[in-house]
Image: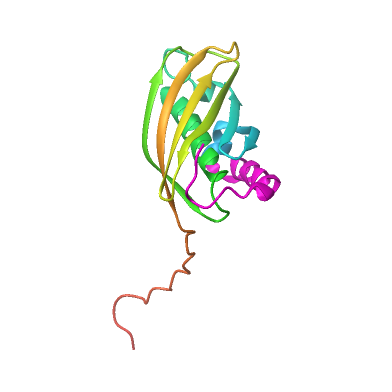
């Protein structure tokens, strides 16, 4: 992994790892899927989930959207681990090949940053089933940007007449 976007803050890895675990527990869609952090280091994140009926499509195999969400999440988190704290990451592009159906067990995504620049990160991700079969292969691009400013919404004035 190379980086021109200020070197990865390695001394903050334990704090960032805690933040990843917190996000997986608090972001509604990720909690719904049951994603959990397996490991995290600068430029690499492994997450997994245990297959449940809610993950299956009509043919009783994991829905491709669930596998893609797992890969996308792992890729975004791997980028997050490669950039300064507080920096934003957003998916720009994702390509995934589904190679094997997954019916049960644990699904694992192992995402590795290939290149992290000032504005973009390219990530490769393997999605594997419980038997270690390569079930999916994803290549993703993430935009890297400044921390979001949190705006406080202004109260709207009521419409209609005011007296």
Q: Position of residue 8 (x, y in %)?
A: 58, 47
Residue placed most toward the observer, 131 or 103: 131
| Above-or-below relation of 134 to 152 | above
Residue 52, located in which quarter of the rendered image?
A: top right
Is residue 41 visible to us here?
yes
Q: Which residues are magenta?
A: 1-28
Q: Position of residue 80 (x, y in %)?
A: 54, 45
Residue 51, located in which quarter of the rendered image?
A: top right
Q: Residue visible at 60% across and 16% down?
A: 105
Quadrant for the C terminus in the image = bottom left
Please name the colour scheme applied to the rendered image: rainbow
Q: Position of residue 35 (x, y in %)?
A: 59, 32
| Above-or-below relation of 20 to 156 | above
Q: Position of residue 106 (x, y in %)?
A: 60, 19
**Number of labelled discs?**
0
Residue placed most toward the observer, 96 or 155: 96
Farthest-out residue, left: 160
Asked whether, in this view, residue 95 is left or right of residue 24, the answer is left
Predominant secondary structure, magenta span: helix
Is residue 3 shown in magenta? yes
| Above-or-below relation of 50 to 23 | above
Residue placed most toward the observer, 90 or 32: 90
Q: Residue visible at 43% across and 73% down?
A: 154
Is residue 19 shown in magenta? yes
Is residue 34 visible to us here?
no
| Above-or-below relation of 118 to 72 | below
Asked whether, in this view, residue 83 is left or right of residue 158, the answer is right
């Amino acid at each position: 992994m190379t980086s021109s976007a200020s070197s990865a803050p390695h001394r903050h890895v334990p704090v960032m790892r805690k933040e990843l675990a917190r996000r997986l527990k608090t972001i509604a869609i990720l909690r719904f899927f049951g994603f959990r952090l397996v490991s995290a280091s600068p430029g690499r994140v492994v997450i997994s989930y245990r297959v449940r009926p809610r993950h299956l499509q009509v043919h009783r195999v994991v829905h491709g959207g669930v596998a893609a969400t797992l890969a996308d999440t792992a890729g975004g988190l791997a980028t997050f681990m490669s950039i300064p704290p507080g920096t934003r990451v957003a998916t720009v592009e994702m390509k995934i090949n589904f190679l094997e159906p997954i019916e049960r067990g644990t699904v694992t995504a192992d995402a590795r940053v290939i290149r992290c620049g000032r504005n973009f990160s390219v990530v490769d991700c393997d999605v594997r089933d419980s038997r270690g079969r390569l079930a999916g292969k994803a290549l993703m691009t993430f935009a890297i940007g400044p921390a979001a400013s949190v705006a406080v919404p202004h109260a709207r004035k009521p419409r209609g007449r005011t007296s």
